[in-house]
Image (cartoon, rainbow, N blue to C red):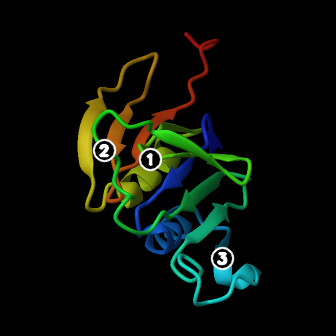
């Protein structure tokens, strides 16, 4: 299983739940922290409700998540969709994340897990040059493109 893009996504108050969900999908180690974990006084705005973290799967696949709490969290129409914080670019709208597996069975299992409570945007019909799968928007609004690696040297 490989990943073609990794994003640091703003989950608008759902980063903790998203990270736990992605750990259940991809496995591996999960790290979740708040500003308070790094010594910010608990009484300061955002100290306990700014959540950030990542899931690092055993194969190196990485999903990162970030929350921006408060009334300014939703992106206003026409507003910039990315911002910088502590040297990291955070997007308020999901990137397309692309995952490629080596077999139909491997990608099928991943598709099934990601598709729970998701919106299927497109399912790719199987053909000689692509064994199928497709694109879905998961329960957290992240769009995933899944496909299967193809050996183009075979007839």
Q: Residues within 10 Å of mark 1 (few under 14, many from 20)?
A: many
Describe the element under mark 3 as helix, strand or loop.
Answer: helix
Q: Nearer the viewer, residue 154 or 130?
A: 130
Residue 76 is marked as 2
| Quadrant housing the C terminus | top right
Q: Nearer the viewer, residue 90 or 102?
A: 90
Describe the element under mark 2 as helix, strand or loop.
Answer: loop
Residue at the image position 46 percent from the left and 53 percent from the top:
110
x, y percentage for residue 149? 57, 30
Earlier-in-chain disc, 3 versus 2: 3
Judged left or right of residue 5, residue 13 is left
Q: Where is mark 3, residue-wise?
A: 35
Q: Distance of mark 3 from mark 2, alpha carbons?
A: 25 Å
Describe the element under mark 1 as helix, strand or loop.
Answer: loop
Residue at the image position 32 percent from the left and 33 percent from the top:
78
| Quadrant housing the N terminus | top right
Labels in figure, total? 3
Judged left or right of residue 135, residue 150 is right
Q: Distance of mark 2 from mark 1, alpha carbons?
A: 10 Å
Residue at the image position 34 percent from the left and 64 percent from the top:
71
Q: Residues within 10 Å of mark 3 (few under 14, many from 20)?
A: some
CB atoms of marks 3 and 1 within 8 Å: no
Residue 82 is marked as none
Q: Distance of mark 3 from mark 1, alpha carbons?
A: 19 Å
Earlier-in-chain disc, 2 versus 1: 2
Q: Nearer the viewer, residue 117 or 19?
A: 19
Q: Where is mark 1, residue-wise?
A: 92
Judged left or right of residue 16, residue 61 is right
Quick check: 40 above or below 155?
below
Residue mark closest to the camera, 2 vs 1: 2
């Amino acid at each position: 299983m490989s990943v073609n893009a990794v994003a640091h996504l703003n989950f608008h108050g759902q980063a903790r739940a998203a990270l736990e969900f992605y750990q259940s999908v991809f496995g591996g180690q999960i790290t979740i922290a708040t500003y308070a974990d790094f010594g910010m006084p608990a009484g300061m705005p955002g100290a306990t409700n700014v959540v950030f973290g990542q899931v690092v799967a055993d194969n190196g696949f990485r999903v990162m998540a970030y929350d921006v709490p408060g009334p300014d969290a939703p992106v206003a129409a026409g507003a910039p969709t990315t911002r910088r914080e502590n040297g990291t670019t955070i997007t308020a709208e999901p990137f397309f994340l692309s995952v490629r597996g080596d077999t139909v069975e491997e990608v099928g299992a991943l598709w099934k897990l990601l598709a729970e409570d998701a919106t299927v945007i497109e399912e790719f019909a199987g053909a000689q040059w692509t064994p199928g799968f497709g694109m879905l928007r998961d329960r957290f609004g992240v769009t995933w493109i899944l496909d299967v690696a193809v050996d183009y040297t075979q007839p």
